[in-house]
Image: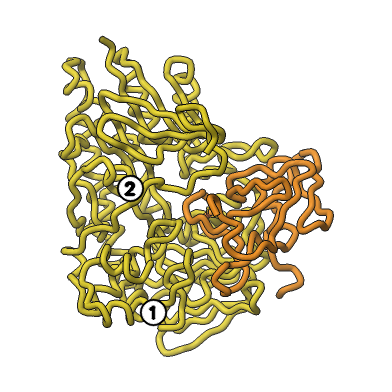
């Protein structure tokens, strides 16, 4: 009987996994939440907003074009389901919905290539109109041809900070400043490992030159960040660097500290997780090929380890090769060279995490009156009080008592900060905290979906 | 800064105009704009927080944060950042609280 392999996600990892499986003659289904392939990084622009690839993807244009072409050529050979979302997994069954109906799909093997979202820490004022994640700010530009404001400040740390700011400047947006929470000495600590990918290191420097050319100030070691507003809209941002306090007027703020894996489906599938000291988050346990601890479930790309698009392409191939091996399909695959390249990606990722560390102290010093949970408007003070009162030491208990992490984003944007606040308030240390348990649906379901039985819910 | 607040269009392309309404007021956008883009270009928000902490206008633009759910005159509720704006849409940003959410 033909075996069905299902891939979730059509970004760099999902595309390369599909390519590898199809080449081996495997019946492959690709499910993607988005309506077009490419993932977040190589997201395609909306119809009518198309521009030449170099304008959209910069130096990565050839890779984006190649990945899109690969997927487009696969379309007729796979069961491709764009605009379809997996909202739950039970044993060998996926629970799906598109915009009109729910359905179920069985699988013999599953490759999760679910990608990443922005890693943020809440800042005072971060829920006001005009504040977006860095990735969101980039989507506004790439997919919609818009800037998130008329005068924009970018704050955070990591490769996306400089990249998005430079893309905005080159596109003609008014960028008032770039505020980096990392210091020069952090950068120095990460630099030796980052030489594993000299091209990327050089590109980072090039982007900083773009900012200088546009006379955009780049401030490092930023602390005490507050986003000001007038009740309807962002009006400015304040911070200290060294001992100086500065205020700038702006109507848009993009914020982010590199990325976090979207690994809820791996959790729901029962994969084991460990603390990842590089990403400083819980990550699913995998072997070097991407086999999870559950039989027949393979993990690839930024949804598993944040290695960037190139690392995701490699991981997608490796996971598909592992899947083929386990299905008893022998083939000639360049496993050794892929693993060797992946090692370089990992070394670089370690360098990045040293150079642009997640600012734990910004989380733990979040003022009591600032909103920690944006879904249910719960302040950091309320969360701390709940921990004090209940002596909760574990995030899922703190969540059920405080509702922080229980909202509609499922802790995507408050989880990292909540974990650090918990650790600083007498809870388990970060590396012993289990992750927040996801609940189905992974994202809220639209109304009026038809159920597999036929009735509308 | 409030006068010019909202998204700023940097790239127009040649796209047909879309006519829709925000809380009954006529507004314009371009085909290919998402509902959220259309709102922000018109200086509008998506909803008012049911917890009394003010207006919300989306955060992630990739369907992850759920900040941008919005109601429409026909009773539909959608994620503004993932839904293309269409001619004749009747967007309602002022509904109180829970009624903005799916399943509410
Ligand atoms: S802005 Fe985050 S889901 Fe739409």
Residue at image position (33%, 28%) is A17
Rendered image coloring scheme: by chain
Residue at disc 1, secondary structure: helix
Q: Colour of chain B?
A: orange
> Circle 2 is placed at which residue position?
A264
Q: Nearer the viewer, residue A127 or A236?
A: A127
Residue at image position (27%, 16%) is A3
Can you tell which chain is drawn yellow?
A: A
Ligand 1 within 8 Å of disc 2? The answer is no
Q: Earlier in the sequence, mark 2 or mark 1?
A: 2
**What chain does badge 1 belong to?**
A
- Write down which quadrant ligand 1 falls in: bottom right
Going by the image, does B6 lie left or right of A385? right
Q: Is residue A228 above or below residue A444?
A: below
> Circle 1 is placed at which residue position?
A382
Residue A303 location, x and y as percent?
Answer: 33, 45
Residue at disc 2, secondary structure: helix
Q: Nearer the viewer, residue A337 or A293?
A: A293
Task: Quote the CA–CA distance across marks 2 and 1.
Answer: 26 Å
Going by the image, does A139 lie left or right of A304? right
User: How many residues crowd mark 2 within 10 Å: few (<14), some (14–19), many (20+)?
Assistant: many
In the displayed image of the protein, which residue is found farthest to the bottom? A243
**What chain does badge 2 belong to?**
A
Is residue A194 among the parts visible in the rendering? yes
């Amino acid at each position: 009987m033909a075996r069905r392999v299902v891939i979730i996600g059509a970004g760099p990892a999902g595309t390369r996994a599909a390519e590898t499986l199809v080449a081996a003659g495997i019946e492959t289904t690709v499910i993607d939440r988005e309506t077009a392939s490419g993932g977040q990084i190589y997201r395609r622009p909306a119809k009518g907003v198309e521009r030449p690839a170099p304008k959209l993807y910069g130096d990565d244009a050839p890779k984006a074009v190649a990945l899109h072409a690969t997927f487009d050529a696969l379309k007729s050979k796979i069961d491709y389901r764009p605009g379809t979302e997996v909202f739950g997994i039970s044993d060998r069954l996926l629970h799906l919905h598109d915009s009109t109906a729910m359905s179920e799909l069985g699988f013999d093997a599953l490759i999760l290539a679910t990608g990443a979202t922005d890693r943020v820490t809440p800042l005072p004022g971060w829920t006001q109109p005009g504040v977006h994640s860095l990735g969101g700010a980039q989507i506004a530009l790439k997919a919609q041809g818009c800037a998130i404001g008329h005068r924009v400040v970018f704050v955070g740390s990591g490769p996306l900070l400089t990249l998005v700011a430079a893309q905005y400047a080159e596109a003609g947006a008014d960028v008032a400043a770039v505020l980096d929470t990392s210091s020069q000495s952090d950068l120095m600590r990460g630099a030796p490992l980052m030489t594993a990918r000299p091209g990327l290191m050089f590109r980072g420097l090039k982007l900083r030159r773009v900012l200088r050319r546009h006379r955009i100030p780049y401030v490092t070691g930023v602390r005490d960040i507050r986003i000001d507003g007038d009740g309807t809209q962002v009006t400015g941002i304040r911070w200290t660097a060294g001992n100086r306090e500065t205020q700038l007027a702006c109507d848009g703020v993009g914020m982010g500290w590199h990325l976090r894996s979207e690994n809820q489906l791996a959790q729901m599938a029962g994969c084991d997780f460990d603390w990842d000291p590089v990403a400083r988050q819980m990550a699913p346990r995998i072997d070097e090929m991407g086999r999870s601890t559950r039989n027949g479930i393979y993990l690839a790309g930024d949804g598993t380890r944040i290695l960037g698009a190139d690392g995701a392409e490699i991981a997608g191939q490796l996971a598909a090769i592992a899947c083929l091996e386990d299905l008893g399909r022998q083939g000639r695959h360049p496993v050794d060279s892929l693993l060797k390249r992946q090692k370089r990606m990992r070394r670089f990722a370690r360098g990045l995490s040293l150079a642009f560390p997640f600012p734990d102290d910004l989380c733990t010093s979040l003022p009591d009156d600032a909103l920690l949970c944006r879904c249910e408007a719960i302040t950091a003070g309320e969360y701390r009080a709940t921990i004090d009162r209940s002596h909760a030491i574990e995030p899922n208990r703190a969540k059920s008592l405080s509702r922080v992490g229980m909202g509609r984003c499922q802790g995507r944007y408050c989880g990292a900060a909540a974990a650090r606040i918990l650790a600083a308030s007498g809870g388990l240390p970060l590396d012993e905290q289990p992750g927040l348990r996801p609940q189905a649906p992974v994202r809220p379901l639209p109304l009026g979906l038809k159920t597999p039985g036929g009735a509308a819910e | 800064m409030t006068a010019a607040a909202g998204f700023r269009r940097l790239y127009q392309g040649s796209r047909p105009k879309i006519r829709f309404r925000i809380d009954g007021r006529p507004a314009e956008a371009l085909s290919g704009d998402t509902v959220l883009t259309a709102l922000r270009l018109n200086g509008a928000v998506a909803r008012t927080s049911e917890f009394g902490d003010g207006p919300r206008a989306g955060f992630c633009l990739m369907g992850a944060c759920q900040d941008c759910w919005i109601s429409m005159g026909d009773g539909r509720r959608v994620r503004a950042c993932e839904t293309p704006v269409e001619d004749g849409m009747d967007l309602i940003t002022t509904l109180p609280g829970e009624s903005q959410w799916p399943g509410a």
